[in-house]
Image (cartoon, rainbow, N blue to C red):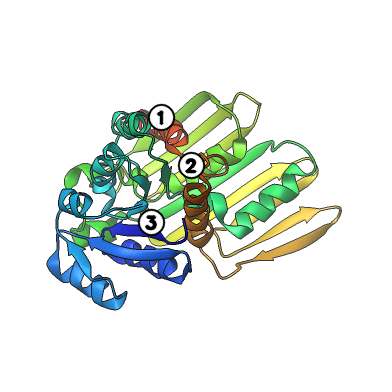
């Protein structure tokens, strides 16, 4: 396979971000874009010189022979947009969350299993150079003992924007903080044994405070903190091991403490999405299964199961 024929569904900011990356790959031909909004698909088509533009996913799948589809629709539509692609046997990378429930994600996994399509979820922190390096440094000395993941945003801003429907507004944990949940679960590297959580509605009508203590079968303990009561976006992680600790300010910079000294980690100019997309396309080219460190659809189900367990801790 010399040139991989790829389409992008969803022509908003995330979709255009994927298009920008895909256009930079010499072995990729971006052949089609799809979006219900005519102005969005035309703007993206013009910007990235894509002639084929569709309002309907089914119409696009009928008309085009595709090696892969990248789904970057609004969060609550990712699973709905990915399902027909997987059912047609088209290799699909979809943005997070991979559905709004475990059952929807299981449906994606089962569809891919039936048709043989490769499926992957865009939890790009698994590929981000800072997180990868910090994890390598900790694990070089032994197992990870404890983790902290935080992701905060403003519910007030989302309410004012009117951007999302009600059922997503009350589950915004799945929209962004699930990045932190997934990378914590990935780094822990074991099945979940216990979950203790508190979820509350505090300054809004929606779930806006989330706190969880997670014990994994290998003994690793994780703390997950996510709230929408702040005025700004904040993301940070801690990875602790044998005489070593990594403190990461999201994916921008970090410090690793060990041997009485400290080592600074800084961004490599990528978001992790470049590495993620390259990995997915290479799996297709080599006809290899999507496996760790990536989030295939089996991994996606496990992360969504953990998310549902946390959300089950809703308190009045």
Q: Circle 3 sits on which residue?
A: 153
Tell me if residue 314 can be seen: no
The Cα–Cα distance between marks 3 and 1, rounded to whole angstroms, is 23 Å
Residue sitting at 51 percent across and 57 percent down? 278
Residue 121 screen position, x and y as percent: 42, 45
Q: Name the residue that disc number 2 marks.
A: 295
- Label 1: state its secondary structure: helix
Q: Nearer the viewer, residue 163 or 94?
A: 94
**How busy is the neighbourhood of tag 3: few (under 14 within 10 Å), some, or many (20 plus)?**
many
- Secondary structure under tag 2 reads strand
Quadrant for residue 248, please give it.
bottom right
Which residue carries the number 1 mark? 305
Above-or-below relation of 50 to 99: below
Query: Looking at the image, which residue is at 55% across and 26% down?
Result: 191
Give the image location of residue 201, x and y in percent: 30, 41
Nearer to us of marks 3 and 1 is 1
Q: In this rendered view, identify the residue nearer to me: 146 or 135.
A: 135
Q: How many marks?
A: 3
* Residue drawn at point x = 19 percent, y = 60 percent: 35
């Amino acid at each position: 396979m010399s040139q991989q024929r790829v389409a992008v569904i969803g022509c908003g900011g995330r979709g255009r971000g994927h298009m920008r990356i895909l256009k930079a790959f010499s072995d990729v031909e971006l052949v089609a874009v799809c979006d219900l909004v005519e102005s969005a698909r035309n703007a993206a088509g013009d910007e990235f010189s894509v002639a084929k533009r569709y309002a309907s996913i089914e119409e696009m799948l009928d008309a085009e022979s595709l090696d892969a589809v990248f789904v970057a629709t609004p969060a609550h539509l990712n699973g709905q947009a990915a399902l027909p692609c997987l059912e047609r046997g088209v290799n699909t990378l979809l943005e997070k969350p991979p559905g709004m429930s475990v059952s929807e994600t299981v449906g994606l996994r089962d569809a891919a299993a039936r048709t043989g399509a490769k499926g992957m979820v865009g939890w790009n922190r698994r590929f981000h150079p800072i997180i990868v390096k910090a994890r390598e440094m900790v694990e070089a000395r032994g197992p990870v003992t404890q983790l902290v993941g935080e992701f905060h945003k403003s519910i007030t801003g989302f309410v004012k924007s009117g951007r999302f429907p009600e059922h997503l507004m009350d589950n915004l944990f799945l929209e962004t903080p699930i990045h932190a949940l997934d990378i914590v679960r990935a780094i822990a590297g074991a099945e979940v044994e216990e979950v203790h959580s508190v979820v509350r509605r505090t300054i809004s009508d929606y779930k806006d405070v989330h706190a969880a203590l997670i014990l994994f079968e290998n003994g690793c303990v994780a703390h997950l903190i996510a709230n929408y009561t702040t005025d700004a976006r904040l993301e940070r992680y801690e990875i602790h091991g044998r005489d070593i600790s990594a403190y990461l300010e999201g994916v921008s910079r970090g410090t690793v403490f060990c041997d009485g000294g400290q080592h600074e980690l800084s961004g490599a100019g990528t978001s992790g999405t470049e590495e993620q997309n390259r990995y997915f396309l290479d799996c297709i080219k080599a006809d290899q299964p999507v496996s760790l460190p990536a989030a295939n659809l089996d991994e996606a189900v496990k992360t969504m199961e953990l998310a549902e367990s946390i959300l089950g801790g809703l308190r009045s």
